Image (spheres, rainbow, N blue to C red):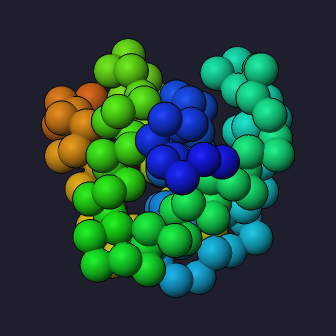
Amino acid sequence: MNDNPAHAFSPQDSLVALMIAISASDEDIRTTELVKIETAVETLPIFADYDDDRLTVVSQVVFDLFEQEDGLDALFGLIRDSLPERLFETAYALACDVAAADGTLEETELRLLEEIRYELSLDRLAAAAIERGARARHLT
């Protein structure tokens, strides 16, 4: 990856970055969350041509940004620069699925989901429907 990751971020990288960010937001990346991310990348049509090796690169970018004071703002800047608006709801749905994968939602995950809704200017009703779907898919 070059010195400026913004130019190297694809729309798929942005989706992966949000999934990694929501998983890392509570400082405890769980196996169920990692499996959810890997399954999404392996099975969803949006990732059909995605290079799986990018997972490591994108994860490192997210971890590096999380160590910086304004890292979350920088992450959202990267995402806004590389993610087309038509994929905003997809991004939120993937983030919700990862957050719900372990069966619990920590306060930090809820706050980051709220921030994602705001940053992507998601309609509140659409966001609620996405959240409800994620909750329904992950009930035990």
Residue 54, horizontal then vertical, whole percent: 73, 45
In which quadrant of the rendered image does the C terminus lie?
bottom right
> In the visual, does 28 lie left or right of 4?
right
Q: Residue at x 18, y 46 (%)?
A: 118
Residue 9, horizontal then vertical, whole percent: 54, 37
Examine the rendered structure and indicate whether residue 93 appears above or below residue 85: below
Q: Residue at x 42, y 28 (%)?
A: 83
Examine the rendered structure and indicate whether residue 26 appears above or below residue 50: below
> In the visual, does 43 lie left or right of 69?
right
User: Which of 101 and 108 lies nearest the eye of the viewer?
Assistant: 108
User: Which of 97 and 70 lies nearest the eye of the viewer?
Assistant: 70
Quadrant in which residue 13 is drawn: top right
> In the visual, does 57 lie left or right of 120?
right
Examine the rendered structure and indicate whether residue 15 appears above or below residue 31: above
Residue 123, horizontal then vertical, whole percent: 18, 30
Q: How many marks?
A: 0
Residue 136 at least partly seen:
no
> In the visual, does 64 lie left or right of 32?
left
Examine the rendered structure and indicate whether residue 5 appears above or below residue 67: above
Residue 69 at least partly seen:
yes
Q: Residue at x 35, y 33 (%)?
A: 81
User: Which of 132 and 83 lies nearest the eye of the viewer?
Assistant: 83
Residue 84, horizontal then vertical, whole percent: 39, 21
